[in-house]
Amino acid sequence: MSRTTGRPKSAAARAQHPVRGAVAPDCNSPAAATRRLSLDWAVCLALVLSVFAAYAPVAGFDFISYDDPLYVTANPHVQSGLTPDGIRWALTAVVSKNWMPVTLLSHMLDVQLFGMRSGMHHLVNVAIHGLAAVFLFLCLRRAAGSRGLSAFVAFVFALHPLHVGSVAWIAERKDVLSAFFWFVALFGYLRYTERPSPRRYLAMAFPFCLGLLSKPMLVTFPFTLWLLDLWPLRRPGWPRTFVEKLPLFALSAAASVVTYLVQGSSGAMYSVPPMLRTENAIVSYVTYIAQTLWPVRLAFFYPYPQSIPAWQPVAAFAVIVAISFFTARAWRSRPWLTVGWFWYLITLLPVIGFVQVGMQAHADRYMYIPMIGLLLLLARSAQEASVRWPAASRLIAVAGIAACVCCLALARVQTAYWQNSETLYRRAIEVTENDVTRNNLVAEYNLAQYLTSLQRYADAVPHFEAALRIRPDYAEAHSGLGIAMMSLGDSAGAVPHLLAAVVARPGDAAAQGNLAVALSTRGDYAAAIPHFEAALRARPDDAGAHTNLGMAMMSLADYTGAIPHFAAALRATPDHAVAHYGFGVSLFSSGDYAAALPHLEAAIRARPDYLAAHYYRGLALSMTAARAADAIASFQAALPVNPDDPAAHAGYGGLLAGLGRTQEAIVQLEASQRLRPNPVIANMLARLRGGKP
C-alpha cells in the first residue's frame, strides 16, 4: 500500500488523501489557531444546543413500563441510591439478562441525586448523548482535519431519529453511556498515535473498559481502531499497529465470553431456526441502511417475522456483497469507502442476530454506533464531490445542512412518542401492523398491561385479545385478559382465560390464585378451593391466598377449616383487615363470640369503613349488655350500607329491646319482617306492642 507522508499540494490531492490537521502555511499564525479553536468550540456549543432542542420535552416524560422497572422503578437496589450494599450488588448483578455494572451505578447515582423524578433521569441521558456527540466531533476533527466533515457526522449522529430510542428511553442508558466512553477512548487513542507511551495507552484503555462495563457492544472497538489506522490516520507498519491492540482484543474477547455465558444462562437467547435467523440478519443489514436514509415509521420494537420471502435475503445479500466488493477494491484510491462500510458491518455484527438475543427482528438502538461508518462514507464522498465539481459545492453544503435540520425536526417528532408507555406502544402498533392483522405481540401485550395498571380495563381488553390472536397460547395474555374481564364484572367470561393460563403454567401461583378468585366471585367456591390450595403449594406464605381460601371455606360454612388459613395470613401480615374479618366471622359463626370480637375490632381499626365488620361486631356485642353502646354504634355504621339485610335489622332490634328502647326496637324488627317474615320476630313484635303471642 502506498502511503502519503507529506502534505498534498493540490486541492484534488487533498480530497483524495487528507492529512490529520493539515493546514496551509499562512494559517499557522497564533491568530489563525485561535480562530480555528473558537470555531471548533462554536460547533461543540451548537451540538449541545441542538441536542437539547431535539430532546427538551423529555424533561416532562414518564418512566416506561418496558424495561424501566428492571433498571429503576421496580429495582430496590437502584432505588436505594448509592450505598455500599448497592455497589456490591451492581458489580455482580445480571439485569435484563446483561451484566453492566457501570450502567447500574449510573442509575443509582441518578436516584441519589434526583430521587424518582423521571424527567431528571431523562435529562441525564440527554446530557450524556450531547457529550458523546461533542467527543465524536473532536475525535473526527483531530483525525480527519476537516471541520465540515466532522461537524456533519457529529450533527447527524446527535439528531438522527434512529437514536431517539437510545436517548429518550431511560433503560437504554447503556447505549449513550457506552458510546460516550467509546469516543473518550477513541480520543485517547488519537493522542496515543501522535506520541505513543504507556501512559497514553492506559488513558485510552481505561475508558474502553468502562465502556465494556456499560454495554458489551464495545467489543468491536479495537477493530474500528484498526480501520481508522487505514484512514484517516494512515499509520504505517501494519503488523506493529495490530500487535499494539492485542490487549484491547483480549479485553473484547473476555467481555464477549462473559456476555455469552450470562445471556445463555439467563435465557436471553431465543430459539429461532438457523435459516430464518440468517435470513433476518442479512435483511436487517439493508433495513438499517434504508432507515438511516429514510427514518420514518420507527418503533421501539419490531416483531420477529414468522417467515421471510426468499427474494428479500437474496436481494439483500447481493447488495451487501456488491458494496463490500466495491469498497474493498477502493481501499487504495478511496479508503474512506472501505473504512466507512466495514465500520458499519463490523460494529453491527454483535447485535445483527446471528446469535438471537431477545424477541426483536431488529432495533433502532443498535444503530447508535454503526451509523457512524455510513455517515463517514457519505460525508467524505460528498467532500470529494465538492472538490471535483466546485460548482456543486454550495449545493452539497446546503444539502448537508438541510439533512441536519430534517434530522432535528424528525427527532423532535419521534421523541414525542416516548412521552409515556401508552403513546409509545400505540405508535409501535400503528407502524408495525400489516393489512391482515396486528402482529406486534410485545406492543399489544404491554399496552394492555399498562392500561390495566391504570384500571382502564375496558380499553385493555381489545389489546389482550389482539395479543392472543397473534399467539393463542400466550399464558400472560390469557391471565391479563381474565383479570381485566373479572374487574369489569364478567367473571364467567374471565374463567376460560384464567383456566388457559393455569393449563399453560400449572405451577404459577398467581395464575392459580386468579382463577380461584374468579371462581369464587361467581359463587363456585368448591371449584375455587383446589386452585387456592395449588397457589399455596407454590407460595406457602402468601397471605392473600390464605385469606381467599379461608373466605371460600367460610362461604361453604367450613369455619373449622377456614380458621387456620386466617391465622396463617395474620402471621404473615398482622394488620390484614380481611383476614381479621374472616377470622372473626368464623369464630362468631362457631359460637365463640368473645374470641370473635378482637378480630372484628382489628379489622375495623385497619379499615374504619369496613361495614361488614361493623355489622358482625354489632351482632357479637349484642350478645352481652355490657357493651351495648358499642353494639349500637356498629349497627348504625353498617345498616345504612346494608338496609336490606333482615338479620341486621333483627339483631339491632333485639339489642334495642333488651335495653328497653321499645319504639326503636319495633321499627327495626318491622323492617326485618318486611324483608323476610319470621315467626320468631313476629312473636317479639307482638310482645313489644303489648299483644298476645
Image: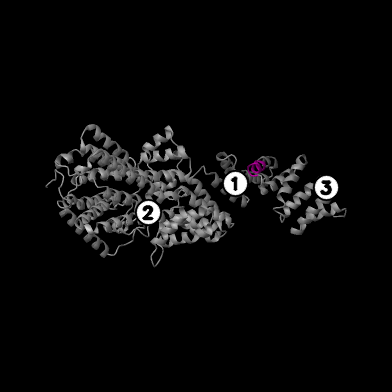
Q: Position of residue 361 (x, y in %)?
A: 33, 56
Q: Position of residue 383 (x, y in %)?
A: 23, 53
| Residue at image point 39% right, 56% down | 409
The disc placed on residue 440 is none
Vertically, is 316 above or below 540? below
**Relative side of 60 to 621, left or right:** left
Q: CA distance from mark 2 to mark 3?
A: 81 Å
- Closer-to-camera residue (445/365): 365
What type is the residue that disc 1 sits on? Ala
Q: Is residue 571 magenta?
A: no
- Closer-to-camera residue (375/496): 375
- Closer-to-camera residue (282/342): 342
**Relative side of 265 to 631, left or right:** left
Q: CA distance from mark 2 to mark 1?
A: 65 Å
**Relative side of 72 to 210, left or right:** right
| Residue carrying label 1 | 562
Q: CA distance from mark 3 to mark 1?
A: 37 Å
What type is the residue that disc 2 sits on? Leu
Q: Is residue 600 magenta?
A: yes
Q: Quick one: label 2, few (<14), some, or many (20+) residues within 10 Å?
A: many
**Relative side of 279 to 651, left or right:** left
Q: If you read the primary sequence from the N terminus, does the residue marked by circle 2 or circle 3 appear first?
A: 2
| Residue carrying label 2 | 408
Q: Position of residue 305 (x, y in %)?
A: 33, 60
